[in-house]
Image (tube, coloured by chain):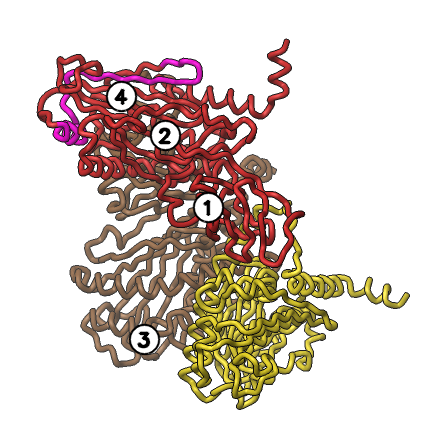
Chain colours: A brown, B yellow, C red
Amino acid sequence: MYPKNAWYVACTPDEIAEKPLGRQICGEQMAFYRGPQGRVAAVENFCPHRGAPLSLGYVEDGQLVCGYHGLAMGADGKVQSMPGQRVRGFPCNKTFAVVERYGFIWVWPGDQEKADPALIHHLEWAVSDEWAYGGGLFHIGCDYRLMIDNLMDLTHETYVHASSIGQKEIDEAPPATSVHGDEVVTARHMENIMPPPFWQMALRGNDLADDVPVDRWQICRFTPPSHVLIEVGVAHAGNGGYHAEARHKASSIVVDFITPETDTSIWYFWGMARNFNPQDQALTATIREGQGKIFSEDLEMLEQQQRNLLANPQRNLLKLNIDAGGVQSRNILDRLIAAERAPAAELIASAQ
Amino acid sequence: MYPKNAWYVACTPDEIAEKPLGRQICGEQMAFYRGPQGRVAAVENFCPHRGAPLSLGYVEDGQLVCGYHGLAMGADGKVQSMPGQRVRGFPCNKTFAVVERYGFIWVWPGDQEKADPALIHHLEWAVSDEWAYGGGLFHIGCDYRLMIDNLMDLTHETYVHASSIGQKEIDEAPPATSVHGDEVVTARHMENIMPPPFWQMALRGNDLADDVPVDRWQICRFTPPSHVLIEVGVAHAGNGGYHAEARHKASSIVVDFITPETDTSIWYFWGMARNFNPQDQALTATIREGQGKIFSEDLEMLEQQQRNLLANPQRNLLKLNIDAGGVQSRNILDRLIAAERAPAAELIASAQ
Amino acid sequence: MYPKNAWYVACTPDEIAEKPLGRQICGEQMAFYRGPQGRVAAVENFCPHRGAPLSLGYVEDGQLVCGYHGLAMGADGKVQSMPGQRVRGFPCNKTFAVVERYGFIWVWPGDQEKADPALIHHLEWAVSDEWAYGGGLFHIGCDYRLMIDNLMDLTHETYVHASSIGQKEIDEAPPATSVHGDEVVTARHMENIMPPPFWQMALRGNDLADDVPVDRWQICRFTPPSHVLIEVGVAHAGNGGYHAEARHKASSIVVDFITPETDTSIWYFWGMARNFNPQDQALTATIREGQGKIFSEDLEMLEQQQRNLLANPQRNLLKLNIDAGGVQSRNILDRLIAAERAPAAELIASAQ
């Protein structure tokens, strides 16, 4: 239950630097590799000769060569050659539109005619020298929507991440959720509170005092299919909070690209983009390590939640005001999935 | 296929000392914890908010707090509070009757109205200063009835535990099985034999010679749902055997509480209670270690037996005289299970 | 989908030297052991008493004794004794014809009346002093026919074993496949090429120069049910190749006995027999180690190929000329399996 006509993050460039990568995305087995002119390509991970995974092969002259018997495939899914064989009649492989942009490889698992690179959101932090980015990848055994729920309701920080970014004041500040077309925004502002350990570290990283009251904000933005970008930060109290001048605050964007592998597993690309001291690579590493530890705390919770839900299909979950972000995001997803599954029906309906 | 209207051992107090415990018992997912006044409580291990396992949370003011978003549940399964929420309309969780007694936490997984603490058997060895107890817990992948069979036919000691408690004379002494209401007793007496290594150790522990002939006994008592308590011991030969005075013998009770997790897995609480040198904690530890090693020898046999039975559903097993203890125990279980499943039918039948 | 009326390699003598061996072959659970006079026997691995695996027991006086309660079974599957029991009415176990020959234990999993030891192929290399043999055993998660395909098309050496026995010239030499009754032969000859590393080692082992051009051959012979014996070798170029005198060449037989465990897993007995320096045990060990490394390179490919095929049942694989060996072998297997499944129908058909 995920949209397939959408751009998902498939992998990062380092994952295909040495050899092809086999990865399942939205139920499709894909082989990613660098083809002609080093451009990224993705084909069905299945050799038409004998069914070997093409990702176990290698790239030669821009072609993906099967590691079993040497069948060479082009980025168009057509078999180009095979030692001692005429390959004209060989069946073609499915191909998948891929785009390398913003430091990620993006893939469109669905209807390939609809794959328009212009539909990839602009990510200013990924192209500007004023920003630095660090991140990682987790494989998690849960429905991608449980991860969206998690990120669109940061109340959980108080409980799951009590020792780093959690604090009681999050609970006490009700979030406000609004929907703008296909975008859902859940915002929470906390005023005049003490910064938790992670933000003390970030304040120090920005040469700011870490032991004084701050205003803190979390502005979560969901956009389909499953991107959640979260503006987070603290400013020394009384300087305008979110709108404070840069010299009073430490702020960043939590980056979450959630790619379904199956109905109950995901590739979770997480990271943080910041616009203070962007040239400080040691700080990037420190933040990345801290964030990795924090986000790994969600793993057990999400996987056990998934198992509990599978074991209790008859239970209806609650939809509270803190859940509004996830609920609204799911509404948008339901609409997109329905439209994908019945495009003809929708056309008729919209003509009436 | 297990009675649910019965008291099972769920866990030991040390398992819930630090944090809640999630455990499946008779197919029910339960969260165990110490609630108000330190009393043990058990609720369905499912947060009504978003399905997280409550056992990943913590206890605060006697309430079980979900570790995901802070929902607090009372021991009655009612939601008491949640930050920023009105919880009056929240659905209740199932609760399970629990009793802490004899050094164990007991749970009643079935019809809660029938959970009468008076139905827990009296265990003299657990309350008397003249006895000492040591034990442990194994998780085993087998039907709980295979474990009952195992314990109600100690012939297997000769083969599975040849180096510790097994000896050929067990084989040669036919057991006598009798049924008393819901209790099954299988008794075996061996006269004038040499003690095997485990009993040599126990004789020494009781300051008795370990190199002289003994009379040995094993009296296995099954009571529903799946408790097997075994009186075992040796007395220097010619002093009356089982009825010998304490100064001539080393005797103890093998304690087995078998709690079904699923149809093919169990929580097996094993231990030994003895009434000689009860204050000798080093001896308790030695016996516990020895018993743990011996009982672990059954694990592979039981799990492979279970797999063999699942793979050969068409095979009828034999019911020999040595199997009488297990067979009679299963008869009682079948009767209890049938009565549970068709209480109305039984009422009608008994009224005719 | 495998013939059951056939001799398969079940195990090697060292596997039953210390204790019985439990192994599933063609879907049958078997217990192998040395019975009366040290002769190998195989019975269903299921104790008729309580279903324990007999392979967990031990051998006493030529009988297989169950390790749970002491039931003793003869090689004829009849229960011989059990402590304290009369065993006359006990059900018999299935038995399997076994033959120890050529350094292997062979088993006939199907119709026992048809088990004729004369049907085991003669293996000259296994009985002649002029040959030495070394080998090993792998468990692989794939259909046994994928392994036959692998061995009947050595084109894959170029890709999977590039650093040892692979070389581009294999690709360039088209193989010739012929069928002789139930035997399939795929032969490939390469002339005047440089020997790859494995063959350099073998040339040195035979006191021959390893840096001069050679003629190389691979003659793969499939015989049912799943034996692939491959004559391989190199001769200094210009001496007649395959027909060169022994002093010009290093040659051997790659031995592959493939025994189905289930439809998607095998016991793969691999090895190499050579007729140069047969008394050199260090060379045997070196070759065995090298071959083990090379053959382990196939494991990941075969297991991922199997998973890919299971996930894509709708895809038809190609049958190229290089696949002729595997395709013809599968044709023979299909015929044998059909004949096994409809023996009556075949009898009628042949009588018309």
- What chain does badge 3 belong to? A
Q: Which mark is residue C22?
A: 1
Indicate the secondary structure of the residue bearing disc 3.
Answer: loop
Q: For mark 2, what is the residue?
A: A47
Is the C terminus of chain C in the top left, top right, bottom left or bottom right quadrant?
top right
- Return the chain for callout 1: C
Q: Residue at x 29, y 55 (%)?
A: A136
Magenta segment includes C41: no
Q: Identity of the amino acid at label 4?
A: Gln
Q: Which residues are magenta?
A: C178-206
Provide the secondary structure element on which disc 1 rests: strand
CA separation in Å, label 4 and label 3: 70 Å
Q: Earlier in the sequence, mark 4 or mark 1?
A: 1
Give the amino acid at mark 1.
Answer: Gly
Q: Earlier in the sequence, mark 2 or mark 3?
A: 2
Q: Using the image as rendered, state which of residue A68 and residue B55 is in the foreground.
A: A68
Q: Which residue is mark 4?
A: C218
Q: Check whether the beta carbons of the residues at disc 2 and disc 3 lie within 8 A of each other.
A: no
Which residue position is annotated with label 3?
A196
Residue at left 50%, top 47%? C63
Q: Residue at x 48, y 53 (%)?
A: C57
User: Would you place residue A319 above or below residue C131 in this image?
Assistant: below
Judging from the image, what secondary structure is the residue with disc 4 in?
strand
Query: Neighbour class for label 1 at 10 Å: few (<14), some, many (≥20)?
Result: many
Q: Which amino acid type corresponds to the residue marked 2 in the rendered image?
A: Cys
